[in-house]
Image: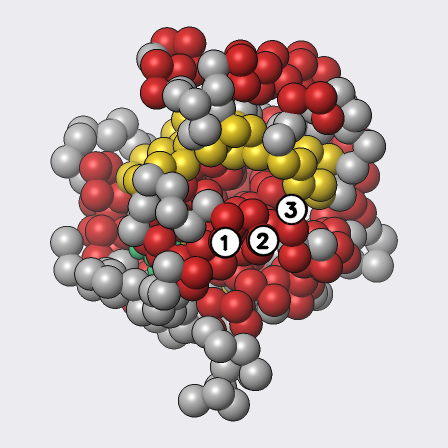
Amino acid sequence: SAAEKGGYDYFMLKEIAEQPRAVADTLLGRIAADGRLVLDEMRITDQELREVDKIIIVACGTSYHAGLIAKYALEHWAGLPCEVELASEFRYRDPILSRSTLVIAISQSGETMDALMAVRHAREQHAKLLGICNVNGSTLPRECDGVLYTHAGPEVAVASTKAFLTQLVAVYLIALYIAQVRGTKWGDEVFAMIQLLAQMPEKVEKVLETMEPVRELARSLANERSVLFLGRHVGFPVALEGALKLKELAYMHAEGFAAGELKHGPIALIEEGLPVIVVVPPRARAVLHDKIVSNIQEIRARGARTIVIAEEGDETVEPFADTLIRVPAVPTLFQPLVTTVPLQVFACELATAKGHDVDQPRNLAKSVTVE
Ligand code: AGP
């Protein structure tokens, strides 16, 4: 009913709007007054975390994209080797696990059969199991040794939005917590990052306040046949997520690429007028940043219509952007929290302009409880 949708036409619109709150709720109570993280609820002891020598993340769909971003955070702050695997592939390999392997399964619903089967496969090999889950009392947390809940609240729309942002918060919390417990070379940075993480709800709110041009852009592209997404570092999984949203909702061909791979093939796809959305890393990561700015020039020279998502104050992109979408400047690893939001709004608006029901896209179910 309209009341359930809080005055919005679709649950998806409501859930996109709820993201600052969802992010804040997922942080709530987890940062102590002294600035340290407290995650006792996780049911995995600090001693157990000190014994971990390898992390494997398993998940599907949008949750898998959160996992891909987690890898950057875990390797950087926790200093642990980390692999990310589609849950549906993991159990058909022979992954090398031991008692000191931590397997993190990410699932909004906690009922995704592929994720549950991956967890069972890992259990047989005696790995430690940690779930990241949004639904209290669902199956996944019961099958894991520990769980860190996301507090997105119920997500009704089939396309995941607020759950994704809270999964990112959960993986940042876990990476920073492991760093805090194990003590890494990044001691001061970890402490500073915890403070900055606490500011993310406002940053997401800022993004939401500036989305009207993105909606206009989406409507103007409703008749395109294909949209490409480019990103680098954590912007690469963001590109994959932007493409997935567009496929799911607008039934449009969309692909995400790692920008560095362009010249290894995908650049052949560029033709006159093709919309390409590029996620630009913060200027603070100068090498990454400059490389992607040259990618933008390369594709534009070949006729692409460049839609550039870049942080406020980044003037270097201006000459090469046909459309420029600004996001607040935040640390590189947190940037997916602000760059994903315009992509959600874009896909949602474009699909609506095509007359699709964004809450119930064709052929899809909210949780996939079969393999
Ligand atoms: C996201 O928009 C999708 N509908 C889908 O990829 C989803 O993220 C995937 O099925 C995993 O679901 P889960 O997080 O509930 O396990």
Q: Which residue sits at x=66%, y=67%?
A: 21
Query: Cα distance, mark 1 to mark 3?
Result: 21 Å
- Given residues 70 and 296, the one toward you in this image is 296
- Residue 174: x and y in percent read 57, 46
Task: Confirm whether residue 274 shows in the render.
Answer: yes
Q: Which residue sits at x=37%, y=59%?
A: 354
Give neighbour class at mark 1: few <14, some 14-19, many 20+ (Cα, 10 Å). some
Looking at the picture, does residue 369 appear above or below residue 56? Answer: below
- Residue 145: x and y in percent read 39, 56
Ligand 1 within 8 Å, label 1 CB? no
What residue is disc 1 on?
Answer: 219
Q: Which residue sits at x=56%, y=63%?
A: 16
* Circle 1 SS class: helix
Give neighbour class at mark 3: few <14, some 14-19, many 20+ (Cα, 10 Å). many
Q: Amino acid at mark 3?
A: Val
- Given residues 33 and 115, the one toward you in this image is 115
Q: Nearer the viewer, mark 2 or mark 3?
A: 2
- Given residues 333 and 106, the one toward you in this image is 333
Tell me which numbered mark, 2 or 3, is placed earlier along the sequence: 2
Q: Amino acid at mark 2?
A: Glu
Q: Are marks 2 and 3 in contact (CB under 8 Å)?
A: no
Query: Cα distance, mark 2 to mark 3?
Result: 19 Å
Residue at the farthest right position: 34
Q: Which mark is residue 338?
A: 3
* Circle 2 SS class: helix
- The answer to which quarter of the image holds residue 72 is top right
Q: Nearer the viewer, mark 1 or mark 3?
A: 1
Numbered circles on residues, count: 3
- Residue 335: x and y in percent read 65, 39
What residue is disc 2 on?
Answer: 216
- The answer to which quarter of the image holds residue 102 is top left
Residue at the farthest top position: 263
